[in-house]
Image (spheres, rainbow, N blue to C red):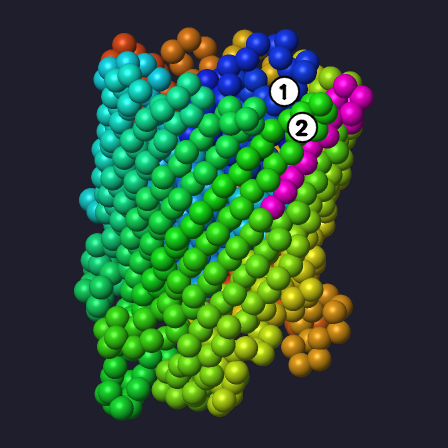
Amino acid sequence: MRRTMVFGASLTALMAGASGALAQSQPQTDVASDERTDMPQDREVVVTAARTVLPPNALPLTIDIIDKEALDRQIAISGSVTDAVATLTPSFSPTRGKLSGAGETLRGRSPLYAINGIPQTTPLRDGSRDGFTIDGFFVDRVELIYGSNALQGIGGTGGIVNQVTVGPPTTEGLSGRTLVQGTVANGFESDSPGGKVAGLVQYKAGMFDATVGASYERRGVFYDARRRRIGINLTQGETQDSRATDVFARLGAQVRDSGRFDLILNRYELNGEGRFVPLAGNRLTGLPTSAVRGDPPGKPAANLAEAVSLSYTDHDVAGGNLVAQLFFNRTYDTFGGEPNPIPTFQDPAIAPVGTLFDQSENRSRKLGLRASYERAVPGFEALVATIGFDALADKSEQRLIATNRVWVPPADFRSLAPFVQANLKLFDGVVRLAGGARWENAKVRIADYRTLASNTYDGRNLATYGGVSVKGGEPGFNRIMANGGVIVEPLTGIRAYASYAEGFTMADIGRITRAVDTPGTDLSSFRAIDPVISNNREIGVEVKRGPFDASTTYFWSTSNNGQVLLALGNGIFQVQRQRVEIQGLEINLGLRTPVPGLRVTTGYAHLIGRYDSDTRNPDGIVDTDLDGTNISPDRMNAAADFASGPVTARVQTQMYLSRSFHGKAKPDPRNNFGGYTVTDAYLRYQTRFGGLSLSAQNIFNRFYIDYNSDTRLPNDNFAFFAGRGRTFTLGWDARW
């Protein structure tokens, strides 16, 4: 499917500001050349996450693009790239408003977050911090590819969220941009103000160019619509009451007319201030969790992400397009401590049970190579073929940093994956056939280890699961992941399509290995750590005629050995491997009205997800609804955009519809979701000295309990969070 909804700009305008090195090196050919080849023109957008230079309408993929203008607007309203994606995408779960994105899914499965194609997701031990690895100031656009696919390798079972960073300068000399903004809650509480300053300087001299920038953001305390502080999640971490810094650099060299090198570096760090402790709410009375001044133990939750990549792109290597990239990425996800010692971390050999404080930290390091070569087949220009090869080494572990114990043993993931793709244009473009395959060769190496010597609650009673010796192993898999599709365009602007794709990820090996309770378990034959392989089938229709555009898509996805997160009674989640089936309907409508500059849009997503709850004797029959930890609610979006001269404005509403959960496993009725509606507004005026903007999140100051905490942990009064009340952001930005 090629929905290719571009939020905030046309494809042509977007291409004019394309940021990836791939987009920057596109050939500048005239229209006549397109009669001989199916390769793209310079004014067509290139979706780098799709690993091709073909335009989106040539691909059997569902693609959305959030351009720079729309992205900046949404970040001003809600504060992060993740919030922007979730707000604009009906199939995406509403965000938790926390540092952790656990339970935030796309089409009911976890998406792969990437920066310029570099994976940020760490599925071996998913700390769910992958949405906070770069400041949105340095992101030029976000590319969304929906549904399971293996285009980027491991992790794309729900889709791909690729953040394309700011591109190199296009004019000689100095240029840049600046941003200053402040945020405050509706009641102007003294601890609610926050602010952000960011700057970017670019310089181009002949074949060389350089881009450097930095940002600093201080977030205040969040307040709900009843002027109560929103609760603090000490363990998983917060974006409220935090400070974040980002340093970005891009150095480039145009070594030939068609090819260039780019070295990109980024260091992002977010640290909680650690000035508040949670105050329990009351689910029975509807009182949400809050926060009071206090001194939580240990280090506040934090996130550190560092990345380096070197790429070479050349659009004229033997008549084809070459892309090669080396990258290194490492992350440190620090989880905060709790005022009361966590039972799981107790060890009587270190301290009396109930007195030992500890906290954990995920550590991940990635080293990878990505390369592809694409060209029209000589003598058969209607066929465009791609060959490529990816290699990835990912080492992850989770340690208890106060006592330097290993909670999750180091897991060393290795992947080698050659792939091929082909795209054939028939009958002068009326029909297109596309398909390919990726041969995934992956292994996970885990050495012998011993689990923690502690007790944990399994949901029914206290049971010792620690102190168990586990034999390591090197499980792996070797599989061809296929994709294919057909596109029919009988009239210009009217298309029908159907596609199939497979994606894979590793199960959360960390959660699984740390919970092994059988002495002598051998990981080489431990089926619980087998990969999650899912498929995605979809059909749809797209119409873009005159002032009207619309699309509708129906998809269904299955995984025979899927991954479901189940809550234990101690705030810790356990992985259950069962068959999972998800299906959904997506509808999008847009209309350019007779009023000059006014455009209205709406979108709707309906998702159904079920799994096989028979853990002892799974029968492959899905009998229980996926809960709020695993799937998003149905949703309808509506928005109106206006642009006239120096004025731009937007009003948007997100309606999250009620959902109840049923099935053989008898989901707790207290986890049912009542639904809520949130409306935001944005206004910007362009002056000679830059743009002034004012935005309001939740402009009607609607009180609500967020979806995630409303549908999970029904007995936990420390995880019952309200959404943010009305919040104002005033900003100034300038380009020079």
Q: Secondary structure at mark 1?
A: strand
Residue at (55, 35) in percent of width and height: 373
The three-letter code of the residue at mark 2 reads Val
Residue 211: x, y in percent?
A: 27, 28
Return the residue nearer the eye: 33 or 352. 33
The secondary structure that dominates the magenta segment is strand
Residue 416: x, y in percent?
A: 53, 55
The three-letter code of the residue at mark 1 reads Leu
Q: Could you tell me which quadrant the N terminus lies in?
A: top right
Q: Which mark is residue 377?
A: 2
**Other-residue count near label 1 (Cα within 10 Å), few / some / many at <14 / 14–19 / ≥20:** some
**Residues rendered magenta in the picture:** 419-431
Tell me the residue that label 1 is attached to.
591
Taking the magenta stretch, the answer to whether it contains residue 685 is no
Residue at (58, 32) in percent of width and height: 374
Q: Quadrant of residue 499?
A: top right
Q: Is residue 353 above or below residue 704?
A: below
